[in-house]
Amino acid sequence: MRIADKMQFDQVKGNIAKNRTQMSELQNQAATQKRVTKPSDDPLAASRVLSNRIDLQGNNQFGKSMTYARSFLEFTDQSLGELGDILMRAKELAVGQANDGTGNEHSRRVVATEMEQLYNQIVAIGNRKIGDRFIFGGFSTQASPFDQKGNYKGDAGEMMVHIDKDSFLPMNVPGGRVFLGKGVSTTGMVKTGPPQAKTIEEFQQQQLRLQPQPQQGPPPPEQAVAVRGPASLMSPTALTNSVEPNPEEDNGVNLFHVVRDFMISLNTNDKEGIQNVLEPLDDALNQVVLTRSQVGSRSSALDSYLASVERQKVDNKVAISQLEDADIFSTVSDINKAESTLQATLETSGKMIQPSLLQFLR
Amino acid sequence: MMDVGRRSLANSQTALQTTAHNVANKSTEGYSRQRVDLVTNEPIGEGKIRIGMGARAGLVTRTNNEYLEKQIEREGNQLGFFNSRADMLGRVEQVYNEQTNEGLNHSIGKFFNSFRELSNNPESLATRTQVKESAAHLARDFQHVNGQLREIQNDADFRIATKIEEINQLTNEIANLNQKVQSVEVTGSPANDERDRRDLLVKQLSEKVNIRYGESKDGQLTITAGNTAVLVSGYSHRDLVAQSTPGSDGKGEGNYEIFYKSTDHSTPVNVTKQLRGGEIGGLLQVRDEVINQFSQSMDEVAFAIAQDVNMAHSQGFDRYGRTGVLLFNAPESLNGAASQFSVNQAVLEDVGAIAAAGEPGKPGDNRIANILSSLQYKRAMGDGSSTYDDYYNSMVGRIGIESQRANSAQQSQGEIVGQLKNIRESISGVSLDEETTKMIEFQKSFDASARLVRTADEMMDTILALKRL
């Protein structure tokens, strides 16, 4: 083959450029420790890295949300524990004052003052706050859910926490349920609210089901905005009713009524009355304990979800690393290989360019 | 005899001159080495004796394989296309590159996470502010990506305009060379240097745009770009013009199109669609097809997010118990949704307008916030086949694949062209060794010819001296 000078120079130029490019790519890999620095390096990996990253981001948030929900539930649990203790104490006192052997008019008066304290404590527990949120108010977290008479101003709203791609867990117990026994069946089982709607369509259907009958009156004019869906047909009062469970299910015990009955009986020295209050007190205690166990099971569910989210986070990170990180051993060995190739290219290039017939004609 | 020597001297000189020309043009792009064709002179003689009358220089010819040149031209056209395509796609790819920095994927995640945070504590102004910030961030990212795509398109316009200028200069010079080639070759000698130069220019032209060309019997090159735009015909050439036009057929508003006028007075014809090859073809393809596809996909994501979020949000109630406003300004149409993606002013001014509740006057109600948070995992795109993230991520995968393919096509085409150029050099290139040898050869024959003249002179002297003896 006929070799022209330009050919040689072009070849040398091309080869050195090729080797240098390879070197610089490998060096970049070694420096960033990344195999994929732009989507075209490995399109499939790049897109999978992204979906893993967004999963990781979501899992981080789920973890954060769960930690928050956990503290909320723990505080609820603690409050319910105190409530149980108070009812237990009330029960003890009631048993003590239910017969004439251990109780008399005087002692009943003394107990009545203690019961008043306990009653106030129950109200205080009902109005407990975490941060600036009343924990027993349902969705109404900014106003005291209970007044001194034990009237409930909150609602039956359950605050759901997004704990997984498609799971929600309620983090609060509406006070109406545990204090007033609303939404509690005859067996003492506590009914939970409707599941969290995942789409706006589901939400509208839930609202439709709960929608009150038309005879409840026309909607207030400011609510009748055209953009609103079926929810706009509900007046605020109707809405409050709508989330309250059916009256048939309100078979629980109203703690305030029971305690107040007990106090009246004590003050009037009514032995029969005190005896009559024993069973409701038991039911009340039961209601609180059941609710508390429900809270406890939510807490433990959260713990296991939290653990699985942590595992998923590790999985995400491992997957990302496997997809985009450079295998440092193979990178380094590739660099060595590329380096020796470059060296060889440079040396042979020097030899190839040097000699020409001209040098031998001096 | 003296005359033979004189002619031989002249021949050697011509050959040395050509060698010098070769050496001087060793590195000239497109140069083909030249040779002097020496032919023997007609011998003279009487009877049986015919005496050779030496040699004379015939033509100076170039060593060149025109089929190879044509092949290089064709492959060079492909290379130009792949080069500009790979280059452009590389830039588009950078817009979607989240390997090193946080992009839209991250913003989408952050946006939905902010609703989870809001759902944890809908009463707090801090979580509401977080929603506002992440929504604004999302809007900025949408606009940013969209803006970058537009910028690449505009840059392509700029480059197209420059290339058109270069094409016009090339065709101008080719038309001039046509004239020179003709005026030289009419005397019967080949116009080596002019043809070399013209071949080179045709190759350069072909790298920029797809052309067809043919040579007439008198050596005139006629060049047509695309199918109908005759750029060079004989001594004359016609310019292409790049002009910004109103948008049409998926082409962005104001992008350049290329026009051709067949005579000075005829109406310009739009030839953009015919220019499918070379650098201009690559630029046009990425600008009009690839980028528009991607920006359409961006519009789809932006439109879907804005619509779905708005729909849920407007069913909720804000901090003051009012019906939820639209969180994002409603896009007018699918087209351009990404560029119009912005947060409602009412929300920017007062984060209390963010609706988390499903009922009015319930500060702790987080049902709408939860619905919004669930939206991230809803298969809302592509007829329920993918989530927003999936859709966006597959977009990143798509540009990755496109770019990867363009890069490898560029590389292999570059190797093909490199190989062909190598072959061309091995035929037409100048070798110093060879030229040095030739130099010695002709120097020797120059010496010998001079000796011949001297010998003839001495012989003459001898003859003249005869008389004196």
Image: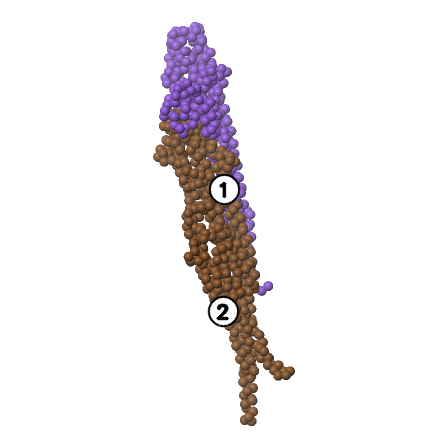
Chain colours: A purple, B brown
Q: Amino acid at mark 2?
A: Val
Whether residue B133 appears in this view of the structure is no
Secondary structure under tag 1 reads helix
Residue at 49% of width from left, 15% of height from top?
Answer: A186
* On-image quarter of the C terminus of chain B: bottom right
Residue B285's mark? none
Q: Amino acid at mark 1?
A: Met
Q: Which residue matches tag 2? A: B184
Residue B35 in percent (x, y) is at 55, 70
User: Which class describes the residues within 10 Å of circle 1: few (<14), some (14-19), or many (20+)?
Assistant: some
Residue at 49% of width from left, 36% of height from top?
Answer: B381
Along the viewing direction, whichever of A19 and A43 lies nearer the viewer: A43
Mark 1 vs mark 2: which is more N-terminal? 2
Measure the C-alpha gap from mark 1 to mark 2: 59 Å
Residue B101 in percent (x, y) is at 45, 43
Whether residue A334 appears in this view of the structure is yes
Q: Chain of mark 2?
A: B
Name, please, the residue furthest toward the bottom: B469
Secondary structure under tag 2 reads helix
Q: Quadrant of residue B443?
A: bottom right
Asked if badges 1 and 2 are on one and the same chain, I answer yes
Residue A74 in percent (x, y) is at 45, 25
Eye-nearest disc, 1 or 2: 2
When the figure is inspected, residue A49 is found, relative to residue B30, above or below; the finding is: above
Residue at 45% of width from left, 57% of height from top?
Answer: B262
Residue at 56% of width from left, 89% of height from top?
Answer: B463
User: Which class describes the residues within 10 Å of circle 2: few (<14), some (14-19), or many (20+)?
Assistant: some
Residue B209 in percent (x, y) is at 49, 55
Name, please, the residue furthest toward the front: B266
Q: Which residue matches tag 1? A: B395
When the figure is inspected, residue A140 is found, relative to residue B225, above or below; the finding is: above
